[in-house]
Image (cartoon, rainbow, N blue to C red):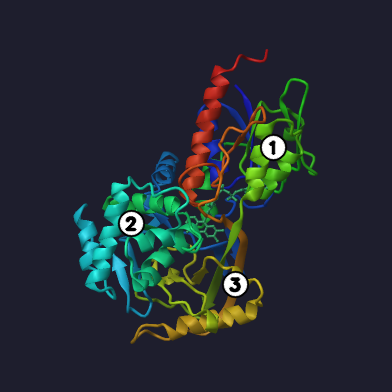
Amino acid sequence: MSRIAVIGAGWAGAACAWQLSQQGHEVTVFESSPTLGGRARRVQATWGTIDNGQHLLIGAYTQTLELMTALGLAPEQRFHRQELRFQSLDQTFSFGYWPLPAPWHQLGAIWGSRGLGWKDKLALLKLMSHLKKQRWQPPVGQTVAQLLTQCGQSPLLIERLWQPLCIAALNTPINEACAQIFAAVLRDSLGSGRHSTQLLIPLKDMTQLWVQQALQDIPYHTGTPIQKLQYDAQQRLLLFSQKPHHALAQPFDCCVIATQVPPAVRLLQSLETSTHAQQEVLSTLKEIRFNPIATLYLQPEFAWTLPTPMSMLYEDHARRHYGQWVFNHAALPTSFAQNTISIVISDAAALKAQDKATVTAALIEQLQSQLPRGQHPLPPIVDSMLITEQRATFWASPQLKRPKANSPWPGIYFAADWVDSDYPAVLEGAVRSGLSTAKLIHTALSDAPSRG
Ligand SMILES: Cc1cc2nc3c(=O)[nH]c(=O)nc-3n(C[C@H](O)[C@H](O)[C@H](O)COP(=O)(O)OP(=O)(O)OC[C@H]3O[C@@H](n4cnc5c(N)ncnc54)[C@H](O)[C@@H]3O)c2cc1C
């Protein structure tokens, strides 16, 4: 049995730790924060539990859903599942799949959309068949904007559909976003069966959804930031934290770095960097850029129900109307955050220079101004919380380079959404990375001669 340390208990670290322990290894998890889940974690607001950001999954997140099933957590009870539908709050625009079996569901999208002309609908089909012909592999270096122009997408279609979709999935604007990563998202969503395109809104908070359960039989230490790594005489790994801990005193056969990029760089820099491959990985990591996501949580005086749990908002930056999506948990009968409204702002760099009170007031005004006719007015807001994750996701540009899971440092592996794959920085990417790194380690340890 090998001793393995996993540093970081986000979705990648938790998936990796669980898979390794299933394979019979002795795993210990170290997490700097007091809460499990990483960038998808529970936060306590004055009025109840919320998350650090409103997360959304899709049916194509197969490895996450399989993992939850293996943990005995029936996804059907932990998500609100609905057909894909992008509907503006004011009801002037709607794009979605009708509940028809594949491939008819794609035609359903064409017939079932509002606010798009015939030319737009045909252009949309053209783009999808163009990508399919390219096997969802646009040329290296192409941006999403270039892809959209090449396939004759109108400004309306770009503004109403492609830009919001690209920002939501890649957290990068179309002019800078990588067409290959965007195509992978389309392949697994709009380009796949109806089940893959369905939207899954969590009914449990993100820590409780599955991470807590996955780690219940694995020793984990929260509030324990690992600050330094070192090899002992047998090339085993020693971990150092300011917090003295029995588990830290023992050497590990290998170590999974499942942190965000900056702490990963610091941990690697605490080791000797002697080879060209090691220097290359460090400079790859240092070149990764990030983009913020902000979420405004509102507590209305009483539960207030919108027609759908999730609606699109129109942006108008001149009026500080930065909101892109509104989620109304009161429309989800069993949501953990029943009395909460959340407004999501991806690509949120514009908020940096503004104070919270001004942004909050402007977003509330945006919500009020786009309510559909006949909708009950927004109740008085009694409390609010604006959470901005400055390094929410990496900047998914065509120039982005990502390191492989097996690092050039002996015994050190990576598991995170930033590890090389065709996915953007999303939950499924993190889970896939965690599971595949665990399998990689298991194979490497099985092949290695024992240390005696
Ligand atoms: C606001 C927001 C909204 C999002 N919305 C969506 C969405 O709707 N759908 C979707 O699919 N994705 C979404 N994402 C992206 C998704 O949350 C991430 O891709 C995913 O959570 C990354 O998981 P990870 O395990 O790779 O990294 P992380 O979750 O960042 O985990 C890294 C962990 O390492 C810990 N750590 C760091 N340094 C140390 C150290 N020195 N010692 C010990 N522990 C350490 C951290 O505390 C953290 O817990 C969103 C992200 C944000 C921020």
357 lies above or below 405: below
Q: Is mark 3 within 8 Å of ligand 1?
A: no
- Residue drawn at (53%, 36%) of the image: 18
Q: Residues within 10 Å of mark 2 (few under 14, many from 20)?
A: many
Q: Which residue is mark 2?
A: 198
* In front: label 1 or label 2: 1
- Residue drawn at (67%, 52%) of the image: 34
Mark 2 or 3 closer to N-term? 2
Mark 1 or 3 closer to N-term? 1
Amino acid type, callout 2 = Gln
* In front: label 1 or label 3: 1
Q: Is residue 205 visible?
A: yes
* 101 or 18: nearer the viewer: 101
Q: Residues within 10 Å of mark 3 (few under 14, many from 20)?
A: few
Mark 1 or 2 closer to N-term? 2
Instruction: Measure how far apart labels 1 and 2 are at the Cα level.
Output: 42 Å
Q: Which residue is mark 1?
A: 279
The quarter of the displayed image where residue 224 is located: top right
Q: Is residue 452 left or right of residue 179?
A: right
* 210 or 14: nearer the viewer: 14
- Please tell me whether mark 3 sits on a helix, a strand or a loop: helix
Q: Which residue is mark 3?
A: 350
Q: Is residue 376 left or right of residue 99?
A: right
